[in-house]
Amino acid sequence: MLFEFLKYLQPTHYFSLLKRNGESVFPVFKALPEALQTQLEPDGHYTSALARDYDLSWQALHKGYIGDTATIVQIASLPVVDNYVFMRKYFSPFWVLYVLLYRLLSFKSPLRELSAYFKTRGVQRSAYWNTPFKYPEWDTFESTLVASAPKVSVIIPTLNRYAYLKDVLRDLEQQDYTHFEVLVVDQSTPFQAAFYEGYDLELDVVYQEEQALWLARNTAIRRSTGDYLLLFDDDSRVSSDWIRNHLKCIDFFKASLSSGVSISKVGAKVPEHYAFFRVSDQLDTGNVLIKRSVFKTLGLFDRQFEQQRMGDGEYGLRAYLHGFLNVSNPYAKRLHLKVNSGGLRTMGSWDAFRTKHWLSPRPIPSVLYLFRGYYGNAAAKRALWRTIPLSIMPYQFKTHKGLQIIGVFVSLFFIPLVLYQVVKSWRLASEKLKIGARIENLSD
């Protein structure tokens, strides 16, 4: 991590890890094109030149720099005060205070911590996402990849959502890029074979008796014949240029993955942090195009995540660590309906940190399986400190300050129960780690 205090705020972030080849994702500021350097803002609050350069590198990546240049590999320690400057620029005051308390409770020097905290009170919060790097060539880019018309395999696992799947398939019929097949792995009860009649699509439907999401996706990947695999959800809507914009992104950036963005309401804007091209720090299997060669290298999805959470996040991390470029693509967007029935809600938990039952593990064990397996136990514990307390409070309390205060006190009564849930999750994750990954290869 460029700034040490990110280990408290983002302990299990993709970019906190070096890739397998020893490189980081952060560009060396002085190696960036001069035209981009002038779009970054040096900060005079830092006490060291190195911290200023690290901040400029962090800005560049998060403002959307995607390109080939030297990256920061040997990351040096920075003064404590510079870490507080960085936090105040890019995180809310609540999280700055959280790190201060965490470090004080970790027996760091109270005088040094408090001095740095108060010295940096004048640092203003950055709004870097309002001035992202532009890629004006995108609008006029004529993709040779699109022109060559490679076959795309659209993969849709479905479970008891025929009413919504109908619209999904109708949207696919309207695509202006036409060289694609659709593979549906249907786990519904009862299975309705007649539902799939009459669609103007190259449609391959498989009935899967076992209700298992990652098995369904792996099965479809094995059956697919396309050079590009487009993973989709059964409760989503897309415009007619959806497939073409995914392929165009792959070609424009010479990427291996194009991660589309999601909105939850008709007419809603794409969230600010996803409204521009950037290196993606996540993978959403409801809207992502992946080269077939990626699966040949990495294998399929890890079935240790079956009926749990973060199987797509693990695959995205696996791709990142192996050096595959994943671009967050604002032009390949979908409307994600997030309907209340069927799908993952039926097979397991929709929320990774909120339990369905009093004695259920918190978080879902697959979360700790991922965190501990890739980041280690210390980072996993920091992630628990950051997420578990907030997960105790009901959703409706988050939007009202008065309810938040009440929620904090109410949550104190649940501490013994929550400790039991966390210990249970840790133990179940240990069992998963002992067994190891359940990743199968994709044969030709």
Image: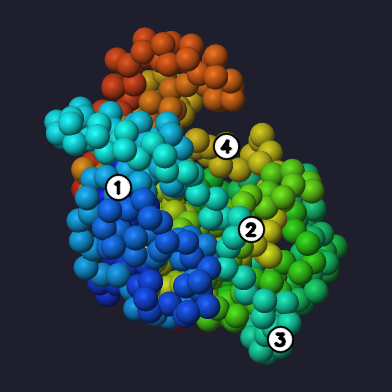
Which part of the image, by quadrant, shows the N terminus? bottom left
- Residue 25, by quadrant, is bottom left
Which part of the image, by quadrant, shows the C terminus? bottom left
Tell me which residue sits at (39%, 36%) in the image: 121
Disc number lying in front (3 or 2): 2
Tell me which residue sits at (54%, 25%) in the image: 398
Q: Which residue is mark 4?
A: 345
- The local crowd at label 2, few if under 14, some if 14 to 19, many if 20 or more residues have their Cα within 10 Å, is some
Q: CA distance from mark 1 to mark 3?
A: 44 Å
Q: Residue 255: which numbered mark, if any?
A: none
Q: Which comes sooner in the sequence, label 4 or label 2?
A: 2
Disc number lying in front (4 or 3): 3
Q: Secondary structure at mark 4?
A: helix
Q: Is the residue under label 2 in contact with that under label 3 (CB below 8 Å)? A: no
Q: Which residue is mark 2?
A: 275
Q: Which comes sooner in the sequence, label 3 or label 2?
A: 3
- The local crowd at label 4, few if under 14, some if 14 to 19, many if 20 or more residues have their Cα within 10 Å, is some
- The local crowd at label 3, few if under 14, some if 14 to 19, many if 20 or more residues have their Cα within 10 Å, is few
Please state which of residues 427 and 225 is positioned toward the viewer in this rendering: 427
Q: CA distance from mark 1 to mark 4?
A: 40 Å
Q: CA distance from mark 1 to mark 2?
A: 28 Å
Q: Which residue is mark 3?
A: 142
On the image, the x and y values in percent for residue 209 come to: 56, 49
Tell me the kind of residue under disc 3.
Glu
On the image, the x and y values in percent for residue 388 come to: 37, 29
Q: Residue 83: which numbered mark, if any?
A: 1
The scheme the figure's colours follow is: rainbow
Q: CA distance from mark 4 to mark 3?
A: 41 Å
Q: Which comes sooner in the sequence, label 4 or label 3?
A: 3
Tell me the kind of residue under disc 1.
Asn
Q: Which comes sooner in the sequence, label 1 or label 2?
A: 1
